[in-house]
Image: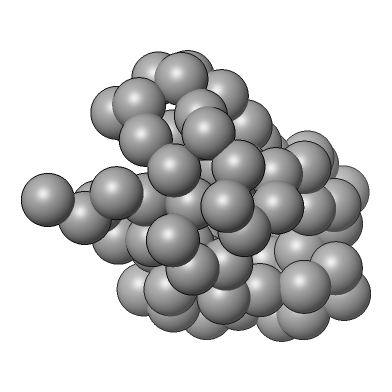
Amino acid sequence: MAEEIRAEMVASVWKVVAQQGASLAAGDTIVILESMKMEIPVLCEEPGTIIELAVAEGDVVQEGDLIAVVG
């Protein structure tokens, strides 16, 4: 079953760490967001493969926006 990873706050995508098709373990970083001069890693909660990466470096995400789909 696919897991949708969504933004928990308004932030800029500072760095994309994992690419589409990459295999991830639980706890691996997908992207790093920047908000109010703080870097916030977005982690994969379950092991899987990135099916869709919906953001790029420099994008601004709103709370609830899709970041990635892991399956």
**Residue depicted at x 77% and y 42%:** 17
Identify which residue is drawn at 85% across, 52% down. Answer: 15
Of 20 and 8, the residue lying toward us: 20
- Residue 68 percent location from the top left of the image: 47, 62
Q: Nearer the viewer, residue 37 or 4?
A: 4
> Residue pushed farthest left?
1
Q: Position of residue 50 (x, y in %)?
A: 49, 51
Query: Would you place residue 50 above or below residue 69 in this image?
Result: above
Q: Is residue 5 visible?
A: no
Q: Is residue 17 left or right of residue 42?
A: right
Horizontal side of 69 relative to 52 (left or right) equals: left
Quadrant of res 46: top left
What colouring does the structure picture have? one colour
Relative to 31, residue 64 above or below: below
Image x and y of residue 51, in percent: 44, 61
Residue drawn at point x = 49 percent, y = 68 percent: 52
Residue 45 in which image quadrant = top left
Q: Is residue 65 above or below residue 70?
A: below
Q: Is residue 29 visible?
A: yes
* As drawn, 52 above or below 60: above
Where does residue 23 sit, x and y in percent of width and height?
A: 53, 34
- Residue at (51%, 29%) from the top-left corner? 24
Judge by depth and name the residue closer to the eye, 60 or 22. Answer: 22
Q: Count up the numbered dots.
A: 0
- Position of residue 71 in the picture relative to residue 24 (left or right): left
The extreme front residue here reads 21
Asked whether, in this view, residue 25 is left or right of residue 2, the answer is right
